[in-house]
């Protein structure tokens, strides 16, 4: 029995050394739990049981490491939340609508220096009707003795550059013009006094406006006893309706486009030649007047106004001649007015300005140039004894205007100007002009 135990002990020792050398753990069903053979272990066999005891003394447990970071104490219990106090809703201010045709910035208010810049004075008279008549002592009607200048049917025309500017304005105004030697017969001339009443009303937040003007002139009658020439006009003029809208504006300049419509509401022109033959030029034609207006405030004291406009007739005026006093109509015809172009420039300077003054709040001086030219030759109608139409064919008129504006109280403007032609007698509509205007800004 003893040799068998020694043999088993020897075999177990050899096998354990082999497994320990190769790194494998040996496991047997008769051994519980599994045992690793190490140098620091002691193997014992007793009663068919093998035990392995560790000879390494037990190491004391390491003390717990203190925490590297101080622990945050628990937060105290939160207070119950207080419901927010309701804030009354503020009334929403109305936002101005954006007009893409006017301003890169929606309806930015214009600075005062642009809105208070004075209007252009103008030099309005329009043009005249020429009449060439035959000498009654000649046997041939083709031999003409003289040319005279007569009013156009409907009287003098008032154009958009007259007492106007690019910026739409709420206003009511009254205008007076005196034209010296505006109409001429062979041996006589006539002056013209023109009165104009009008108003302008803005809409679409002040970016556009409509304006009405009604001119009224003194009835003009002129005759010469030598040749028997005479003509007669009446007071009613042509009603003018103008539409204007801003296409660009900022704090110092504004550009507007517009269209004026000259309606044929005025009187006809009646002419008598040789004391026997009478002629009538009807007021039938409506005129369209498109324009471009520019306005600038160069600084607090200097300002500028500019206009470019065209006067185009839409139809002709009919002409009639009668033979003898109360005679029947002999001939008929028609004559079309010329198309005119107007170029106007106005520079001004504030001589004095005090917005806090009780009476006189400002005084401005203005210097203007006005150029008028015909874009086509005159149309004429031959009525045997007379020939209606412009006598000079085409013409170029240049006038100089010097004006003064006084700002009275808050919204009242008093304006006065003097106009003188810079061209010769064949290229002028009058010898001189004086104008007076009263404007109430609303």
Image: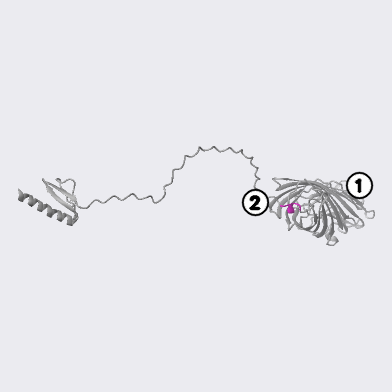
Is the C terminus in the top left, top right, bottom left or bottom right quadrant? top right
Q: Quick check: marks 2 and 1 in contact, CB under 8 Å?
A: no
Q: Which mark is residue 325?
A: 1
The reply to whether residue 214 is in sight is no
Label 1 SS: loop
What residue is drawn where x is 60% and y is 38%? 87
On the image, numbered disc 2 is attached to which residue? Answer: 105
Main secondary structure found in the magenta portion: helix
Q: Is residue 429 above or below residue 208?
A: below
Of residues 227 and 192, which is closer to you in this image?
192
Image location (x, y in percent) of residue 232: 88, 49
Q: Residue furthest right?
A: 225
**Crowd class of label 2 (few under 14; some 14 to 19; many from 20; radius 10 Å):** few
180 sits to left or right of 98? right
Image location (x, y in percent) of residue 128: 83, 54
The question of residue 160 being in magenta is answered with no
72 sits to left or right of 23? right
What residue is drawn where x is 51% and y is 38%? 81
Of residues 270 and 182, which is closer to you in this image?
182
Image location (x, y in percent) of residue 437: 83, 50
Q: Which residues are magenta?
A: 111-116
Image location (x, y in percent) of residue 393: 80, 59
Q: Which of disc 1 and disc 2 is earlier in sequence?
A: 2
Q: CA distance from mark 2 to mark 1?
A: 68 Å
50 sits to left or right of 433? left
């Amino acid at each position: 029995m003893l040799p068998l135990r020694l043999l088993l002990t020897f075999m177990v020792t050899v096998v354990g050394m082999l497994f320990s050398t190769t790194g494998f753990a040996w496991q047997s069903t008769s051994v519980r739990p599994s045992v690793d053979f190490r140098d620091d272990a002691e193997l014992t066999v007793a009663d068919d049981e093998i035990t392995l005891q560790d000879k390494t003394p037990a190491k004391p447990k390491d003390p717990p490491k203190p925490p590297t970071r101080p622990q945050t104490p628990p937060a105290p219990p939160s207070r119950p939340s207080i419901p927010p106090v309701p804030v009354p809703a503020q009334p929403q201010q109305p936002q101005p609508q954006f007009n893409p045709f006017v301003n890169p910035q929606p309806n930015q208010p214009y600075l005062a220096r642009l809105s208070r810049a004075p209007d252009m004075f103008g030099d309005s008279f329009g043009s005249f009707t020429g009449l060439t008549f035959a000498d009654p002592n000649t046997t041939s009607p083709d031999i003409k003795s003289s040319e005279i200048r007569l009013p156009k049917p409907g009287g003098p025309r008032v154009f958009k550059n007259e007492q106007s500017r690019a910026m739409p304005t709420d206003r009511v105004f009254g205008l007076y013009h005196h034209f010296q030697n505006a109409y001429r017969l062979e041996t006589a001339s006539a002056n013209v006094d023109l009165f104009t009443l009008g108003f302008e009303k803005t809409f679409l937040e002040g970016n556009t406006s409509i304006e009405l003007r009604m001119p009224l002139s003194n009835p003009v009658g002129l005759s010469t006893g030598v040749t028997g020439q005479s003509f007669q006009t009446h007071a009613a003029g042509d009603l003018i309706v103008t539409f204007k809208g801003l296409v660009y504006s900022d704090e110092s300049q504004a550009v507007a486009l517009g269209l004026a419509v000259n309606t044929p509401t005025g009187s006809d022109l009646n002419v008598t030649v040789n004391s026997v033959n009478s002629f009538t030029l009807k007021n039938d034609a409506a005129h369209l007047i498109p324009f471009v207006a520019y306005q600038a405030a160069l600084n607090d004291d200097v300002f500028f106004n500019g206009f470019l406009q065209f006067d185009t007739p839409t139809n002709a005026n009919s002409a009639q001649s009668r033979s003898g006093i109360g005679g029947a109509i002999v001939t008929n015809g028609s004559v079309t007015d010329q198309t005119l172009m107007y170029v106007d420039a106005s520079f001004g300077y504030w001589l004095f300005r005090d917005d806090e003054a009780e009476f006189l709040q400002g005084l401005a001086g203005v210097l203007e140039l006005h150029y008028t030219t015909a874009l086509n030759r005159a149309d004429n109608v031959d009525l045997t004894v007379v020939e209606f139409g412009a006598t000079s064919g085409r013409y170029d008129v240049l006038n100089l205007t010097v004006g003064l504006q006084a700002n009275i109280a808050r919204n009242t403007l008093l304006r006065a100007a003097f106009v003188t032609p810079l061209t010769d007698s064949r290229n002028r509509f009058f010898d001189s002009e004086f104008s007076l205007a009263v404007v109430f800004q609303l």
